[in-house]
Image: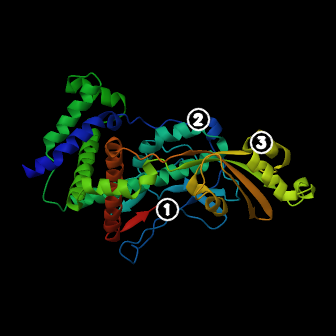
């Protein structure tokens, strides 16, 4: 019963992902505008003849001689190592990678403890996004975008493979009925109420029922292993949520805001040459604060001088130290200065002070809890993957 309780949330998650699991379509040819030249040279990258000498060693996922960069080629016979297309790495990123490999390709992209990950597995996951890249991004960005996408997808596939292999050493098993329940959910989501009709629909989408069933089982295993690891490591408590909120109050509320007007007088300002000079200018400002914007328009070389020198609302913590010190005990309407900095005399007028606003914890708590739980989950799984990789032999063939 305890095992069933652990796996029950997994079933609910997989039901929501049913459409995503079944919506795997065969890769199609991409627009001709994104294909490489027909005579592009090809480099065969052979897998290492001997296993890496050190446990946990990972073979680099990109081969380069300093002048060329390797990416997946469009052809493979399924027997030789993955072919990669060799392109000049002359700083001109943008030559698009070759068309995605056909669904029938059995070339190996990587292996984890001898268990292979095929190129087909990766391409099936990236096909839709690659099509979007070809259709939405400039041609100059195709190459790097697709290379990044495939490498990220391969990295995720390696993590999944590590979890699947680790599952074999566990004592619990995902009940077959869970898999069948998900198959039923997928069929019902497409308005299908018989297995015969459902299987016919799958075959029309180039997906075998057995293949889909295996995908569902693997998804359940990954979800179960993830949930089990997180359960073992503990979750975020209400006290931790509250502590984070209190320790980062400025992140959720609004700090004190100041609206300042500024007059900046450069060394060659005519104010210094007039009778009475700077002191007369300051006396005029304090006698008639309303003249600040007019004087700013006449004499200031600071920002927004034409509109009275207003700097807009700024957090008090964002003010430069000289200004913050002058504003320490100021109130709205005060004239401050001269403040000498960087060879310039500044005059400030406090136009408005907006008091700080404290955020409501109860209103923020649900979103904050979700965010902290996601970060906690990602941290736990990142550590778990590092632990599993340290004990594994991983080879990458592209």
Q: Nearer the viewer, mark 1 or mark 3?
A: 3
Q: In 3D space, how far apart are the residues under numbered discs 1 and 2 (Cα atoms)?
A: 26 Å
Which residue corresponds to mark 3? 291
Observer-nearest of 360 and 384: 360
Judging by the rendered image, the residue that carries numbered circle 2 is 135
Judge whether residue 73 can be spotted in this image. Answer: no
- At horizontal 84% and vertical 58% (from top left) the residue drawn is 278
Helix, strand or loop for disc 3? helix
Q: How many numbered tags mark residues here?
A: 3
Q: Distance from label 2 to label 3 (Cα)? A: 58 Å
Whichever of callouts 1 and 3 sits on the residue coming sooner in the sequence is: 1
Q: Residue furthest left?
A: 1
Chain-order first, disc 1 or disc 2: 1
Nearer to us in this view, 388 or 271: 271
What's the CA distance linking mark 1 and mark 3? 67 Å
**Can you give x and y, in whole percent of width and height, for residue 237 in the image?**
24, 55
| Image depth: mark 1 or mark 2 in front | 2
Pinpoint residue 392: horizontal percent, then vertical percent: 33, 68
Q: Tell me the residue at 18%/35% (across/down).
A: 181
What residue is disc 1 on?
A: 61
Residue 174 drawn at (x, y percent)? 16, 48
In the displayed structure, would residue 151 be above or below residue 22?
below
Give the quadrant of residue 140.
Answer: top right
**Classed neighbour count for the residue bearing mark 2: other residues with Cα under 10 Å, few (<14), some (14–19), many (≥20):** some
């Amino acid at each position: 019963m305890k095992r069933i309780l652990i796996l029950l949330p997994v079933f609910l998650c997989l039901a929501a992902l049913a459409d995503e699991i079944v919506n795997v379509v065969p890769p199609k040819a991409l627009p001709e505008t994104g294909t490489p030249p027909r005579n592009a040279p090809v480099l065969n990258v052979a897998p290492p003849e001997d296993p890496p000498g050190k446990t946990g060693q990972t073979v680099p996922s990109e081969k380069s001689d300093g002048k060329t960069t390797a990416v997946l080629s469009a052809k493979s016979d399924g027997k030789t190592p993955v072919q990669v297309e060799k392109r000049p790495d002359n700083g001109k990123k943008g030559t698009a990678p070759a068309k995605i490999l056909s669904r029938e390709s059995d070339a190996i992209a990587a292996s984890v403890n001898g268990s292979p990950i095929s190129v087909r597995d990766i391409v099936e996951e990236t096909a839709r996004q690659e099509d979007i890249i070809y259709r939405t991004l400039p041609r100059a960005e195709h190459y790097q975008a697709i290379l990044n996408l495939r490498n990220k997808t391969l990295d995720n596939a390696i993590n999944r493979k590590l979890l699947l292999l680790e599952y074999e050493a566990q004592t619990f098993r995902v009940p077959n009925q869970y898999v069948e329940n998900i198959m039923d959910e997928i069929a019902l989501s497409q308005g299908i109420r018989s297995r015969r009709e459902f299987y016919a629909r799958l075959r029309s989408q180039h997906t075998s029922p057995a293949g889909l069933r295996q995908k569902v089982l693997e998804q359940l295993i990954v979800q179960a292993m993830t949930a089990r690891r997180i359960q073992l490591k503990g979750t975020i408590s209400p006290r931790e949520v509250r502590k984070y909120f209190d320790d980062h109050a400025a992140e959720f509320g609004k700090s004190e805001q100041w609206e300042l007007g500024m007059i900046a007088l450069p060394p060659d300002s005519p104010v210094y040459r007039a009778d009475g000079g700077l002191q007369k200018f300051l006396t005029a400002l304090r006698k008639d604060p309303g003249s600040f914007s007019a004087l700013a328009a006449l004499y200031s070389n600071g920002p927004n001088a034409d509109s009275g020198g207003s700097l807009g609302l700024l957090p008090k913590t964002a003010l430069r130290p000289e200004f913050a010190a002058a504003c320490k005990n100021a109130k709205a309407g005060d004239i401050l200065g001269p403040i000498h900095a960087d060879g310039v005399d500044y005059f400030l007028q406090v136009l408005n002070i907006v008091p700080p606003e404290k955020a409501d914890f109860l209103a923020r708590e649900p979103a904050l809890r979700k965010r902290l739980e996601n970060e906690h989950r990602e941290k736990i799984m990142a550590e778990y993957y590092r632990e599993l990789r340290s004990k594994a032999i991983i080879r990458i063939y592209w």
